[in-house]
Image (spheres, rainbow, N blue to C red):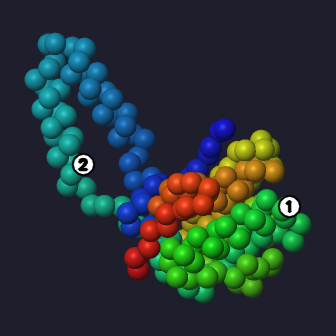
Amino acid sequence: MKTMKTMKDSKSTAQCPEEPVFPFFMLFMVKWLLSLLLLRKTLRLPAVAAALLWCQCLAAAPPAPHRGVNVAAMQGWDIVIDPNAIASERYAAEQFQHYCAEASGVRLPVVEAPARPDRHVFIGPGAAMRAAPADSGVANFGPEDLRIVVRNDIIAIAGGRPRGTLYGVYTFLEDYLGVRFLTHDHTHVPPVGG
């Protein structure tokens, strides 16, 4: 199963950041410094000094501003599904509603048409999701592919038909709410702090 997500895991705070905090160029620099350390014996001392300086700069950098969604504070949100959603997409919306309510105490209503531009959880592909700023573009997905998109005040979970959206909801519940599906009759749902 191929999984595509565009958000960062942070189980302990139930926050869903919009974009990764560690930029690609930093990975490149760390790889370059490690190659200097391991491959070039003559440059070992300058490479170690450069690596230490780089780590000190990383530690001194201010943290990136958090621009995600606080799952514990979703009062006033709704779950949007397409009027033409298939049965598994409707079931995925019900599962999201149930476990979100159990974790946070907030029962989100399920609607077919959004009444405002923000504070929505889009479940499954549809016209409303395509019109939102978090369009996930799942037209060419296979039956188990999925995408989770988080923007300020919008979450979009969609996937290929028939199972991708349901798998996306379960992935979101596990990765961001800490839900654990232990057996067929026992699921651990930790409370999400506000």
Q: Residue at x 72, y 56 (%)?
A: 165
Q: Secondary structure at mark 1?
A: loop
Quadrant housing residue 55:
top left
Where does residue 167 sit, x and y in percent of width and height?
67, 52
Q: Residue at x 21, y 41 (%)?
A: 54
Instruction: Between residue 159 and residue 139, name the one nearer to us.
Output: 159
Where does residue 63 sit, x and y in percent of width and height?
31, 61
Q: Secondary structure at mark 2?
A: helix
Where does residue 53 sit, x and y in percent of width and height?
16, 40
What is the quadrant of the N terminus in the image? top right
In the picture shown, does residue 73 fall above or below 51?
below
Amino acid carrying mark 1 in the image: Ile
Amino acid carrying mark 2 in the image: Leu
Instruction: Between residue 180 and residue 159, name the one nearer to us.
Output: 180
Instruction: Using the numbered discs, state the Cα–Cα distance from disc 2 to disc 1 in whole angstroms.
Output: 47 Å
Q: Residue at x 67, y 67 (%)?
A: 95
Q: Is residue 32 visible?
A: yes
Determine crowd level at label 1: few under 14, some 14-19, many 20+ residues with C-alpha closer than 10 A: few
Circle number at residue 58? 2
In the picture shown, does residue 158 fall above or below 98?
above
Residue where numbered disc 1 is placed? 86
In the picture shown, does residue 155 fall above or below 7?
below
Instruction: Between residue 75 and residue 183, name the one nearer to us.
Output: 183
Determine crowd level at label 2: few under 14, some 14-19, many 20+ residues with C-alpha closer than 10 A: few
In the picture shown, does residue 59 fall above or below 31?
below
Q: Is residue 141 visible?
A: no
